[in-house]
Image (spheres, rainbow, N blue to C red):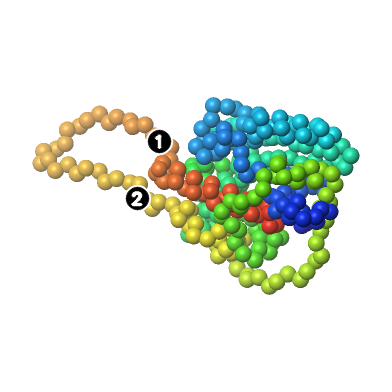
């Protein structure tokens, strides 16, 4: 997913200001953009927060909201279609149904997607981000272990180390391309609802996404790689992707998950008993279930803010 230059719409006043604060990302140079939606359908929001849903298909908006949008677009002569995106999360595979609206006169297309969706990828964006930062912040560098930790916390056991490697490279490209001069905000921004402010209509009518004048970049601090295969120094990553989160990536020590066997103090030899096979519970990370839930919910909140802030400030996805 590439960056887009700063928006320079031919609009005045509050609408222009609102458009410049939209979490809008351009997918290619042919007028296709993604608008990240912060406030979602209650069913989709519940699935992201709890991992539970009875539906195999989740919509970004309520049926009533979709009808209002579609009626308005058709009235203005715009075309729309439903698009599908498969995603795996919390042990379930679901399909996200989102709207794409286009102007046949300008060729501009805008897809309205949930903030956590990573177009073209099967997992939510916060899973990739967590896995990359887990590896970067780990004392013992192991992409396999970071993949297991991320998969266990977000219910995706098939998440593998090669995906962690690609996520780190994507994060590195983002840091270099944007030359961030401060950390991304971990608080979800307060912003005008783009579907009610007239912004989508203005964009479809031909607001051009033109570049800003080039300027000399300010000198940035240079952090050397901390380990082979780690292209991002932990200080640089944590400076850009939020502060005071290190506890979210800490793994329990081996002795924290083991239990001492009861000592047999009888003087006579112990009686031979038939050993019963105990069921094996898969928990490769050793993270207690309650702690996994705490980490997941805390990181969801933090990542939502960073995703939206990256889209608004730098016109790019977090990864």
Quadrant in the rendering for residue 185:
bottom right
Height in image: 55 above or below 314? above
Q: Is residue 259 left or right of residue 104?
A: left
* Residue 151 image position (x, y, % from top left): 52, 42
Residue at figure coordinates x 66%, y 60% from the top left: 175
* Residue 199 image position (x, y, % from top left): 75, 46
Mark 2–mark 1 CB contact (< 8 Å): no
Height in image: 219 above or below 172? below
Residue at figure coordinates x 59%, y 61% from the top left: 183
Q: Mark 2 or mark 1: name the one nearer the start of the chain.
A: 2
Graded by Cα atoms within 10 Å as few (under 14), some (14 to 19) or many (20 or more), the crowding at tag 1 reads few
The mark found on residue 281 in the picture is: 1
The mark found on residue 256 in the picture is: 2
Graded by Cα atoms within 10 Å as few (under 14), some (14 to 19) or many (20 or more), the crowding at tag 2 reads few
Q: Foreground residue, 152 or 29?
A: 29
Residue at figure coordinates x 43%, y 37% from the top left: 282
Q: Distance of mark 2 from mark 1, alpha carbons?
A: 17 Å
* Residue 96 image position (x, y, % from top left): 65, 34
Q: Is residue 138 visible?
A: no
Q: Secondary structure at mark 2?
A: helix
Q: Foreground residue, 50 or 89?
A: 50
* Residue 155 image position (x, y, % from top left): 51, 38
The mark found on residue 73 in the picture is: none
Q: Residue furthest left?
A: 267
Q: Foreground residue, 36 or 17?
A: 17
Height in image: 164 above or below 246? above
Q: Is residue 53 left or right of residue 287?
A: right
Height in image: 164 above or below 220? above
């Amino acid at each position: 997913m590439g960056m887009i230059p700063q928006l320079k719409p031919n609009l005045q006043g509050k609408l222009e200001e609102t458009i410049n604060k939209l979490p809008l990302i351009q997918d290619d140079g042919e007028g296709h953009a993604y608008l990240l939606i912060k406030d979602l359908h209650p069913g989709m929001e519940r699935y992201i927060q709890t991992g539970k849903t009875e539906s195999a298909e989740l919509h970004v908006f309520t049926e009533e909201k979709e009808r209002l949008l579609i009626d308005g677009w058709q009235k203005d002569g715009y075309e729309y279609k439903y698009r599908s995106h498969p995603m795996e999360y919390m042990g379930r595979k679901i399909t996200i149904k989102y709207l794409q609206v286009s102007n046949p006169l300008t060729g501009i297309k805008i897809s309205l997607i949930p903030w956590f969706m990573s177009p073209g990828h099967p997992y939510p964006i916060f899973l990739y981000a967590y896995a990359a930062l887990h590896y970067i912040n780990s004392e013992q560098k192991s992409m396999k272990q970071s993949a297991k930790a991320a998969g266990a916390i977000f219910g995706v056991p098939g998440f593998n180390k090669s995906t962690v490697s690609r996520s780190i490279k994507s994060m590195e490209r983002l840091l270099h391309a944007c030359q961030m001069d401060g950390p991304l905000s971990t608080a979800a921004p307060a912003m005008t609802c783009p579907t009610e402010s007239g912004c989508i209509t203005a964009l479809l009518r031909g607001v051009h996404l033109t570049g800003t004048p080039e300027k000399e970049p300010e000198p940035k601090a240079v952090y050397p790689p901390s380990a082979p295969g780690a292209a991002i120094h932990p200080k640089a990553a944590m400076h850009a992707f939020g502060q005071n989160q290190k506890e979210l990536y800490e793994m329990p020590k081996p002795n924290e998950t083991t239990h001492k066997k009861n000592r047999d103090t009888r003087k006579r030899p112990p009686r031979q008993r038939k050993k019963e096979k105990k069921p094996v519970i898969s928990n490769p990370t050793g993270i207690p279930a309650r702690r996994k839930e705490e980490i997941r919910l805390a990181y969801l909140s933090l990542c939502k803010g960073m995703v939206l802030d990256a889209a608004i400030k730098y016109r790019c996805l977090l990864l």
